[in-house]
Amino acid sequence: MNIAVTGASGFVGGNLIPYLKSLNHNVLAISRTNKFTYSYLDSIFIDKNNINIVIHLAGKAHDFKKTIRPSEYFEANTELTISLFNEFLNSKASTFIYFSSVKAVTDKGSLPITEEFNADPISVYGISKLKAETYIQSMVIPESKKVFILRPCMVHGPGNKGNLNLLYKIVSKNLPWPLGAFDNLRSFCSIDNILFILKELIEREDILSGVYNVADDEPLSTNSIIKLIAVSQDQTAKIWNLPKAFIFVLAKFGDAFRLPLNSESLQKLTESYVVSNKKILLAIGKSLPVSSKDGLMKTLKSFK
């Protein structure tokens, strides 16, 4: 297969491209750092390179520091996707795989998020992803083509600490985790499972087009993750079950004095966000190769 991958220099792209090559696929890597710039997508690059499959990873990631202008999200996540998808429709390529995000559905998810949820994102990031999804779904897709919209939750793997970085630093410094009284569950997605799912989508003809959540099988609590981090460092986890009322007071104090522990950070650290992967598993008809705990442990051990 001849496969074009946008966002080639990102974390997923950096893992996907050598993986596809190991499966003997020809890969056209597209990123801002090579000659195939995003503006180049306005030409008929798909047919010129005899591309069979387009995997669209490129976009503006969620900025928790809030330094990115809203227009940048819509330019990178919405307009670029629309431009590329239009070219795909007018090309000879057979398959388009768009990496969206579960944040296109909701920013909060205490109940398992399924593909049937009514999308109501709050963040500009989520809204920009949803607009791209909406455009793709509004178009008439020829019977000869397949279109997959994937909604991964938090992706991790060796070399990518992501949101695990803060927790990892706390355990590394042998500091106690003070939020043990909060009981939550969060879904994660191992890069190994993402690569497995992509392999199934590009090499099989029996998987139907559609929107699919991508997540590991088992959501994990923050307390469980703290314990896994400690094990990866050959330590014993220190988890304090301080009264929630006391923690809320500390968070209010953090709001007033702009401390790391404030109401916003407390919510992010303790809220649940559970994503259902039942639809993609049913479509593939196979189990994911990596369990939630094994995938996280592989990632955590890579941080040393």
Image (cartoon, grey):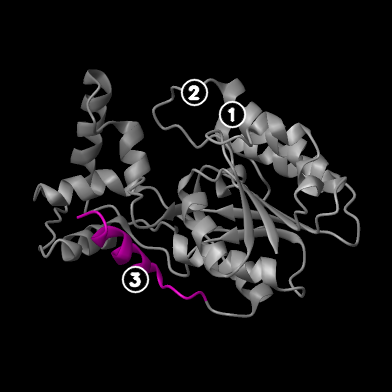
Number of marks drawn: 3
Residue 243 can be seen in this image = no
Which comes sooner in the sequence, label 1 or label 3? 1
Give me the residue at 59% from left, 80% from top.
286
In space, the residues marked 1 and 3 are separated at their CA atoms by 33 Å
Name the residue carrying label 1: 73
Quarter holding the C terminus is bottom left
Q: Quadrant of the N terminus?
A: bottom right
- The reply, left or right, for residue 224 in relation to residue 62 is left
Q: CA distance from mark 2 to mark 3?
A: 34 Å
Closer to the chain start, of discs 2 and 1, is 2
- The residue at the far bottom in this view is 286
| Region of the chain picked out in magenta, as a range | 288-304
Q: Is residue 287 above or below residue 296?
A: below
The reply to whether discs 1 and 3 touch (Cβ–Cβ < 8 Å) is no
Residue closest to the eye, 36 or 235: 36
- Residue, disc 3: 294
| Left or right: residue 82 compared with residue 100 | right
Which residue is tagged 2?
A: 68
Amino acid identity at mark 3? Asp
In this picture, is 178 found above or below 76? Answer: below
The answer to whether one can see residue 203 in this image is yes
Q: Residue 67: give x, y in percent of width and height.
A: 44, 22
Labels 2 & 3 near each other (Cβ < 8 A): no
| Res 145 → quadrant | bottom right
Q: Nearer the viewer, residue 70 or 142?
A: 142
How far apart are the two marked residues, 2 and 1, measured between alpha carbons?
A: 8 Å
- Residue under the image location 16 percent in, 61 percent down: 230
